Image (cartoon, rainbow, N blue to C red):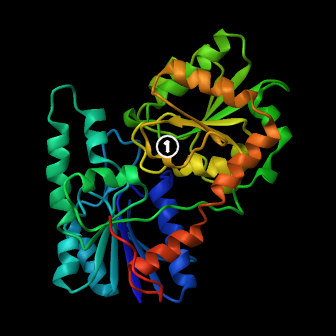
Amino acid sequence: MRIAQVANFYGPSSGGIRTLMHHLGAGYVAAGHESFLIVPGDRYERLDTPYGCVITLPSSLIPGSGGYRAILDVDRVCTALDEIAPDRVEVSDRLTLRSLGWWARAHGIPSLMWAHERVDGVLDAWLPGRWPTRRMADSWNRSTARRFDRVVCSTRYAAEEFERIGCGTVARVALGVDLAMFHPTRRDEQLRRALLGDDSGSLIVMCSRLSREKRPELAIRAVQALAADGLRTRLVVLGTGPLEQRLRSLAVGIPVTFLGHISERERMADILASADALIAPGPIETFGLAALEGLASGTAVVASAPSALSEIVTTRSGRLVAGTVESFSQALREVLSMPVVERSQAARDRACEFPWSRTVESMLTLHGLTDLPALDHG
């Protein structure tokens, strides 16, 4: 079978969507299928990779997005799909690519859409006060859902806004983590000392896109509160985004280091394994792949309780808190006071419940390409 994955917001510095597509593509290839990825870029390119044939289409930069691109000319995607002649279509976008559901239906091809974000949460983060964000999200989601045969959500939290409108085609498929790449044995004391700038203190990492809905300022303020109480810590920020310069100004005088986007996965894994805690302040995360990579590295996670990380982080592997500076700083104190070996093992044990192989198997089942029973909807 030929499986085509199509996405926006895929690029050199993108995170979860890119990682998901690569692991699914590699899994599909390993299962004997042909994998195609159609993604935005600055020019046309076709490249064979271990995770399939990647077709890059010339696309527009999104202003204020920190470098993300979106495919606006959907006809180009349709042309590429006509050439591929896929047997299944997966779409990771809820903006310009929604019409691909209609294209697939017109061609008799089963299709699905990955719901990588909560529309209501994004609207709440970006629209002021009295906008009817829930009604707007519900209307948009109804329109989106009826275009595709399935809506795939990685968590209950992600699925809630579709279940709220009575969508009967929701399937839940948890994402995974590379358990070989992200491992506690990658802890590097020399790297740790270099990041801390000292032999003592606790190393906290935040791996996030630096944008409004991610609430990255909470991490900086929490570390500031710890420093004010005399606790020696340093926050290392991995990621870029439209708020970067504002956050750099906010962090003046606070023990914070900005490393930007880390493209080398090995270096990312080394940093995560060398940290004492990972902070994930985003309140509308629909999964939290970076946090799961932290857990796999043996690093405890302090996350926002309203987010989907409430389904992943346990009291043994971290803390879930309200979205305030005080709650994050207190949770960091608690995590950092836990015995190192115990918290590392608990984090690793939890992450081991999420191998990518399970994600791939679930998707193949959803596509009807295994001998297993079909996934339960809803």
Q: Nearer the viewer, residue 107 or 44?
A: 107
Q: Is residue 89 left or right of residue 248?
A: left
**Residue at 30% from the left image edge and 41% from the top image edge:** 122
Q: Is residue 317 left or right of residue 287?
A: right
Answer with the quarter of the image where residue 150 lies.
Answer: bottom left
Identify residue for label 1: 310
User: As shown in the figure, which amino acid type bears the numbered disc 1?
Assistant: Ser
- The x and y percentages for residue 40 are 36, 62
Image quarter hosting the N terminus:
bottom left
Q: Residues within 10 Å of mark 1 (few under 14, many from 20)?
A: some
Q: Nearer the viewer, residue 206 or 57?
A: 206
Residue 48 visible, this angle: no
Q: Is residue 257 above or below residue 264?
A: above
**Residue at 14% from the left image edge and 51% from the top image edge:** 139
Q: Is residue 237 left or right of residue 288?
A: right
- The x and y percentages for residue 266 are 70, 55
Q: Nearer the viewer, residue 363 or 109?
A: 363
Q: Secondary structure at mark 1?
A: helix
